[in-house]
């Protein structure tokens, strides 16, 4: 049991830190990045966000985002296999919060909007309308994944305190 607790501790620590960093990044977008982009002209906002969406795919952030999902998945499996362990409910809830509220929402809500934005030509007369819809919808879903990532980080931290 000692080696299981050691493994759970290391994985929960990685998941707590990863979820916290991801949540903090999303919080920055929700609290000021998207607001700043909404204050510039639509073409400038579109170009800036298109650039951000390319840069994030080649950065350390993508590895952290996907890596945290992999660790959360592993913790969910371990929590279910070792359900009688006192921290299992916290680990499972933290994992589900990250996997569903952060990872799945990103793939089903934010990424499709990013892909649609990537196809927008700023000279298109409809670009301004698309940009305003994008800002509202993307930011709304970003709020959801921000809360989910921070909740996951807190749940993993609570599990750490009990290990």
Image (cartoon, helix red, strand yellow):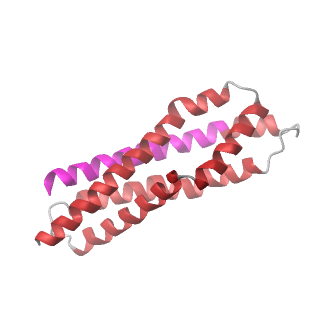
List the single residue furthest toward the top. Answer: 39
Q: Residue at x 21, y 49 (%)?
A: 158
Residue 79: horizontal and vertical position, in percent?
Answer: 25, 68
> Where residue 140 appears, x then y in whole percent?
56, 40
Assign the magenta stretch its main secondary structure: helix
* Depicted 45 relative to depicted 96: above or below: above
Q: Is residue 159 rendered to the left or right of residue 124?
A: left
**Residue 107 point in image, percent of width and height:** 57, 58
Q: Nearer the viewer, residue 60 or 153?
A: 60
Above-or-below relation of 6 to 93:
below
State the residue at coordinates (74%, 50%). 118
Q: Quadrant of residue 75?
A: bottom left
Asked if residue 160 is among those painted magenta in the image, a careful observer would answer: yes
Residue 130 drawn at (x, y percent): 76, 40
- At 29% from the left edge and 46% from the top edge, which residue is drawn? 154
Residue at x-position 60% and y-position 55%: 58
Kindly give the residue lying farthest to the left in the view shown: 2
The magenta stretch spans residue 153:
yes
Q: Quadrant of residue 15?
A: bottom left
Figure quadrant of the C terminus: bottom left
- Position above or below: 35 against 106: above
Query: Who is closer to the viewer here, 53 or 113?
Result: 53
The quarter of the image holding the N terminus is bottom left
Residue span colored magenta: 135-163
């Amino acid at each position: 049991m000692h080696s299981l607790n050691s493994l759970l501790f290391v994985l929960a620590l990685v998941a707590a830190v990863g979820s916290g960093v991801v949540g903090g990044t999303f919080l920055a977008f929700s609290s000021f990045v998207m607001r700043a982009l909404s204050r510039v002209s639509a073409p400038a906002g579109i170009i800036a966000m298109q650039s951000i969406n390319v840069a994030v795919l080649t950065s350390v952030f993508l590895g952290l985002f996907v890596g945290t999902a992999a660790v959360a998945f592993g913790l969910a499996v371990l929590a279910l296999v070792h359900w009688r362990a006192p921290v299992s409910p916290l680990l499972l809830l933290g994992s589900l919060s990250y996997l569903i509220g952060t990872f799945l929402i990103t793939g089903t809500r934010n990424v499709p909007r990013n892909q649609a934005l990537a196809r927008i030509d700023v000279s298109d007369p409809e670009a301004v309308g698309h940009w305003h819809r994008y800002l509202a919808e993307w930011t709304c879903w970003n709020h959801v994944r921000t809360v989910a990532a921070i909740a996951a980080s807190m749940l993993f931290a609570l599990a750490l305190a009990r290990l």
